[in-house]
Image (spheres, rainbow, N blue to C red):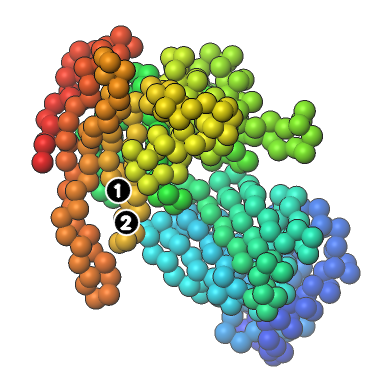
């Protein structure tokens, strides 16, 4: 196809606007090949693009500024995929697509840059049409009766859409499309990006390996899921991991050898919403299932409702539980957990605070700073004293030494410090869980008290 379109396109005499050519192609294909397009356009891409190329060459059609292959690809994505959004949806260096209006689309890259898209929709109606196409793939509908939609397009892609009358009709649509963990970061990536030190990462992975429950906290987009995914990937292959996610699956922890044999021990689960309570499977229900599946590590993708109570119950029964939640600091994380637990049971705050601090002795707070870098700002332990009181103390922290603005860009300087060691009671628990003494000595050495 590419050879043919390149050969004939050079003599294309009938130059038109892209929208005119698109309309002609749509009418041509819908009248002759509608069934093929409706079935599964992804599988039929080669045939569809061949028919597009044939029509362009037969009628010597062209668009100023586009070569033949570029025009064919653009027509295909406009008709069978998601217009110019397609290139961003399936890129590996994109974290978020924010549609503010039909002519204002901002792209957030993995390195923190936020740039306008190189293209825009042709009209408010065009924006609505493309977004509806996206939603349709996952069975979601955007119309006047349902102008706000929150859901998932596929594994790893979350979407929130606001249409008319929530937004102005002349803006078309507003949407936030978040692509979760497009790249699997490794230990060296976190070190290279200065997200954490090697000592911090080894400390966290070792504690999870030997049964300590922990919570990763921070705001949306701070990197919680990415960090938790790496931590889970460090769990030894013989340990059984049970993951629980809400709405769509973001983790992919299954490891295979070169012959396709699974070499680790992982169960991935995801919630299923239903208006029928008997058919509804939420995170709390999946936690009940998890406890009967002999897990070594349970991952609750995010605590944001009543499942927080079940998660802390699981952690207090001896299972290693790792989860995330939204909070502004390590200390605030426990108060956030208390608030979530009250959605399930009417228990006084002091009792719940004692429960969640026992359940999750370790908390790490990760933040996206103004210079778009991500840092593990603090790792804390909540120590339970002999008299039952709680004492939160910092183990590691990122200390900001300087904030400056250079050429209009914020620059942040700082350094990581090891502030203290885990308590004797937590060290005892690690030894009881099988940690070698030599390894315990390694992770408790070198406190750098500021």
Q: Give coordinates of residue 386: x percent, y percent.
A: 26, 14
Q: In the image, is 140 to the left or to the right of 344?
A: right
Q: Quadrant of the N terminus?
A: bottom right
Cα distance in 3D space between marks 1 and 2: 7 Å
From the viewer's perspective, is residue 11 above or below residue 49?
below
Query: Residue 375 has which mark?
Result: 1
Q: In the image, is 425 to the left or to the right of 119?
A: left
Camera-side residue: 341 or 181?
341
From the viewer's perspective, is residue 385 above or below residue 421?
above
Disc 2 crowd, CA 10 A, few/some/many (<14, 14-19, 20+):
some
| Residue at figure coordinates x 74%, y 83% from the top left | 20
Q: Disc 1 or 2, which lies upstream in sequence?
A: 2
| Residue at figure coordinates x 65%, y 52% from the top left | 150
Camera-side residue: 73 or 125?
125
Q: In the image, is 437 to the left or to the right of 290?
A: left
Disc 1 crowd, CA 10 A, few/some/many (<14, 14-19, 20+):
many
From the viewer's perspective, is residue 411 above or below residue 157?
below
| Residue at figure coordinates x 53%, y 62% from the top left | 97
Quarter of the view holding residue 145: bottom right
In the rendered structure, are the residues bearing label 1 and label 2 in contact, judged by CB atoms less than 8 Å apart? yes
Q: Give coordinates of residue 59: x percent, y percent.
A: 77, 83
Camera-side residue: 29 or 309?
309
Q: In the image, is 344 to the left or to the right of 116?
A: right
Q: Which residue is mark 2?
A: 369
Q: Is residue 15 visible?
A: yes
Q: Give coordinates of residue 310: x percent, y percent.
A: 54, 24
| Residue at figure coordinates x 62%, y 34% from the top left | 270
Instruction: Tell me the SS state at disc 2.
Output: loop
State how many labels appear.
Answer: 2
Q: Give coordinates of residue 336: x percent, y percent.
A: 45, 38
Q: Is residue 233 visible?
A: no
């Amino acid at each position: 196809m590419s050879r043919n379109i390149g050969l004939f396109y050079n003599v294309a005499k009938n130059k038109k606007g892209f929208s005119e050519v698109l309309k002609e192609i749509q009418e041509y294909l819908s009248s002759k090949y509608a069934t093929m397009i409706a079935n599964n356009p992804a599988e039929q891409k080669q045939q569809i693009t061949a028919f597009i190329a044939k029509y362009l060459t037969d009628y010597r059609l062209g668009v100023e500024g586009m070569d033949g292959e570029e025009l064919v690809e653009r027509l295909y994505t406009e008709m069978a995929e998601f217009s110019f959004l397609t290139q961003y949806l399936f890129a590996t260096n994109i974290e978020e697509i924010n549609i503010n209006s039909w002519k204002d689309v901002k792209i957030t890259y993995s390195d923190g840059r936020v740039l306008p898209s190189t293209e825009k929709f042709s009209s408010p109606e065009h924006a609505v049409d493309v977004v509806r196409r996206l939603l349709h793939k996952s069975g979601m509908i955007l119309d006047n009766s349902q102008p706000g939609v929150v859901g998932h397009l596929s594994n790893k892609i979350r979407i929130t859409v606001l249409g008319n009358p929530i937004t102005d009709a002349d803006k078309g649509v507003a949407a936030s499309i978040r692509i979760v963990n497009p790249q699997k970061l490794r230990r060296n990536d976190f070190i290279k990006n200065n997200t954490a030190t090697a000592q911090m990462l080894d400390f966290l992975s070792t504690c999870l390996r030997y049964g300590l429950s922990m919570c990763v906290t921070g705001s949306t987009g701070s990197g919680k899921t990415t960090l938790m995914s790496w931590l889970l990937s460090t769990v030894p292959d013989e340990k059984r991991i049970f993951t629980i996610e809400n709405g769509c699956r973001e983790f992919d922890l299954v490891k295979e050898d070169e012959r396709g044999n699974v070499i680790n021990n992982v169960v991935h689960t995801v919630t299923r919403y239903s208006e029928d309570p008997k058919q509804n499977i939420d995170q709390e229900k999946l936690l009940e299932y998890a406890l009967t599946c002999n897990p070594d590590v349970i991952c609750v993708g995010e605590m944001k409702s009543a499942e927080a109570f079940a998660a802390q119950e699981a952690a207090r029964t001896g299972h290693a539980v790792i989860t995330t939640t939204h909070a502004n600091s390590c200390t605030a994380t426990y108060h956030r957990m208390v608030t979530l637990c009250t959605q399930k049971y009417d228990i006084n705050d002091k009792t719940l605070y004692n429960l969640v601090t026992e359940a999750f002795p370790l908390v790490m707070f990760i933040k996206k700073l103004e210079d778009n870098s991500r840092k593990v700002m603090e790792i804390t332990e909540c120590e339970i004293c002999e008299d039952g009181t709680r004492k939160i103390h910092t183990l590691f922290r990122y200390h900001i030494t300087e904030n400056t603005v250079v050429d209009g860009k914020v620059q942040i300087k700082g350094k990581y410090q090891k502030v203290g060691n885990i308590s004797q009671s937590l060290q005892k628990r690690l030894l009881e869980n099988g940690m070698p003494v030599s390894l315990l000595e390694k992770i408790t050495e070198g406190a750098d008290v500021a």
